Amino acid sequence: MQKNKQKIAIIREKIFRNNCFDSRLKTHKLTGSLKDYWAFSVTHSERILFRFINEKEVIFYKIGTHEIYK
C-alpha cells in the first residue's frame, strides 16, 4: 500500500509543478496558526502542507493525514 501512495504522491507533485491550483489537487489556504501555509490533496485523506516563498518557489513541509495541521 505504501508504494501505491508514493506513486500517487509523485503524480500529484507533477500536477502541482504544472499548475499548483489544478482542481484535482484541491489546493487551499489554511487559517489560524497555519495562515501562512497552504495544502493540497494527494489522496482523499493524505495532504501535502506547503508555503509559497515567491511566485515560482514553494517549500513542502509535511505529508500525511489531517494531523499535519497540528
Image (tube, grey):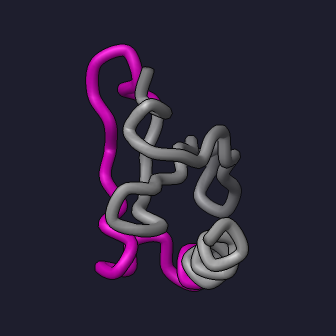
Specify the quadrant of the image occupied by residue 8.
bottom right
Left/right of residue 56 with respect to residue 31 in the rendered view: right
Q: Nearer the viewer, residue 41 or 55?
A: 41
* Residue ID at (33%, 65%): 44
Q: Is residue 25 magenta?
A: yes
**Residue 45 coordinates in the image, percent (x, y):** 36, 56
Left/right of residue 59 with respect to residue 40 in the rendered view: right
Left/right of residue 37 with respect to residue 1 in the rendered view: left
**Residue 5 coordinates in the image, percent (x, y):** 60, 71
Q: Is residue 20 visible in the rendered structure shown here? A: yes
How many numbered marks does the figure carry?
0
Q: Nearer the viewer, residue 13 or 56?
A: 13
In the picture, which quadrant includes the N terminus? bottom right
Specify the quadrant of the image occupied by residue 4.
bottom right
* Residue ID at (43%, 49%): 39
In the picture, which quadrant includes the C terminus? top left
Q: Is residue 17 visible in the rendered structure shown here? A: no
Q: Nearer the viewer, residue 54 or 65?
A: 65
Specify the quadrant of the image occupied by residue 34.
top left
Magenta stretch: give its range. 14-36
* Residue ID at (37%, 15%): 33
Q: Is residue 22 magenta?
A: yes
* Residue ID at (41%, 63%): 41
In the displayed structure, 51 sits above or below 33; it is below
In the displayed structure, 30 sits above or below 13; it is above
**Residue 43 coordinates in the image, percent (x, y):** 42, 68
Q: Nearer the viewer, residue 52 or 7?
A: 7
Q: Residue furthest top?
A: 33
**Residue 14 coordinates in the image, percent (x, y):** 64, 82
